[in-house]
Image (cartoon, rainbow, N blue to C red):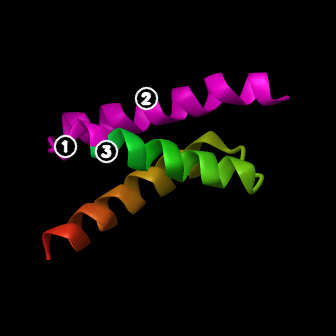
């Protein structure tokens, strides 16, 4: 089961990354990748498997995180 979740999480993170990168919202790639992986992994551990929910949540959470750090 775990082996099948790793590519799933990687795919979701990559799509979220692409969206954020296209909108020029990634200023620190290491911080962004760490944040996205942690966010998606936590949701998957809690049982979320719907790709669209994971994507939207990761993107929205990253935007809030980045905004809070700027304040």
* Residue 32 numbered mark, or none: 3
The location of residue 23, given as percent across then percent down, is: 19, 42
Residue under numbered circle 2 = 14
Q: Quadrant of residue 49?
A: top right
Q: Secondary structure at mark 3?
A: helix
**Contact check, label 3 and label 1, Cβ < 8 Å:** yes
Q: Quadrant of residue 18?
A: top left
Dot 2: few (<14), some (14–19), or many (≥20) neighbours within 10 Å? Answer: some
Residue under numbered circle 1 = 28
Which of 26 and 31 lies nearest the eye of the viewer? 31
The location of residue 47, given as percent across then percent down, is: 77, 52
- Where the N terminus falls, by quadrant? top right
The location of residue 37, given as percent across then percent down, is: 49, 42
Which of 35 and 62 lies nearest the eye of the viewer? 35
Dot 1: few (<14), some (14–19), or many (≥20) neighbours within 10 Å? Answer: few
Residue 9 in the image: above or below residue 58: above
Q: Magenta segment: does it hold 39? A: no
* Residue 61 numbered mark, or none: none
Going from N to C along the chain, the mark reached first, 3 or 2, is: 2
Range covered by the magenta-colored residues: 1-30
In this image, 44 relative to 20: left or right? Answer: right
């Amino acid at each position: 089961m775990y082996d099948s979740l790793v590519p799933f999480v990687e795919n979701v993170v990559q799509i979220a990354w692409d969206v954020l990168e296209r909108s020029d919202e990634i200023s620190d790639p290491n911080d962004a990748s760490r944040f996205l992986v942690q966010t998606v992994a936590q949701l998957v551990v809690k049982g979320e498997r719907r790709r669209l929910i994971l994507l939207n949540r990761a993107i929205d959470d990253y935007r809030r995180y980045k905004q809070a750090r700027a304040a």
